[in-house]
Amino acid sequence: MPSDKAPHEECPDMRMPHSMPRGFLRLVLLGLLKGRELSGMDIMRILAERTDGIWQPSPGSIYPLLASLEDNGAIEVARTEGRSKIYRLSKQGLGQLRAAFKKKGALSEKANMGPRLWEKLLDPVERARFNVMVFTHHLSSLESILDRLTTRQKQKLLSHLEQMSDHLTTIIEHLKKENQ
């Protein structure tokens, strides 16, 4: 009998892989530091919050990267509070971040490769569950940012969502026909 538990609850090895494309975490840190000052602990907390606790980066992955970004001039120490360094994005780092976002299509493809590969490894039932979970997450994420979008951005989003609605309607109708 199938279990109601998610695959990762039954078998810890079935959790979503946590690795990121090479260089992606570097851009994430630059993005987090854009317009604000953060410590390494702040960064780890924000990343854990933004991933709903699914990914909790370790100091061993964050602090060496912060040191490297500082050595390369992408970030700088704004101030020191006790033993903690508070970082900010440098002009050079802002330029690197802008250059990366100009290539956002390639960046998005790389960022989506892990989940797409993971999905292909799942059997059809797990794959359906995974896709519903991801879709639900994306809808919640969209809903949480609606008030921060411009009117033009909202109109563009509405157009995309209407197209998605058509696809969803097709899937729902197909499922209803099979269940009759």
Image (spheres, helix red, strand yellow):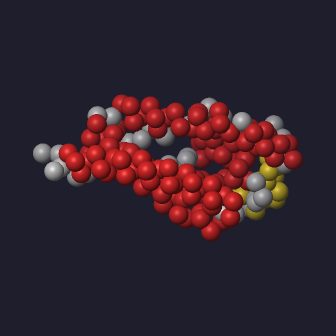
Give the residue drawn at x 75%, y 39%.
102
Extreme residue toward the right, this view: 91
Left or right, 166 with reference to 97? left
Give the residue drawn at x 62%, y 68%.
147
Q: Residue 159: x percent and y percent?
A: 57, 54
Give the residue drawn at x 78%, y 43%.
98
Q: Quadrant of the N terminus?
A: top left
Extreme residue toward the bottom, this view: 147
Q: Residue 51: x percent and y percent?
A: 51, 53
Q: How many marks are shown on the rendered structure?
A: 0
Left or right, 25 with reference to 14? right
Q: Residue 132: x percent and y percent?
A: 37, 50
Left or right, 24 with reference to 72? left
Left or right, 89 with reference to 177? right
The correct choice, above or below, for 128 with respect to 33 in the image is above
Residue 177 in view (yes/no): yes
Residue 69 in view (yes/no): no
The correct choice, above or below, for 137 with respect to 171 in the image is below
Q: 31 or 123: nearer the eye?
A: 123
**Splitting the image into 4 quarters, where does residue 7 fall?**
top left
Q: Residue 61: x percent and y percent?
A: 60, 41
Extreme residue toward the left, this view: 1
Q: 47 or 166: nearer the eye?
A: 166
Give the residue drawn at x 71%, y 50%.
31
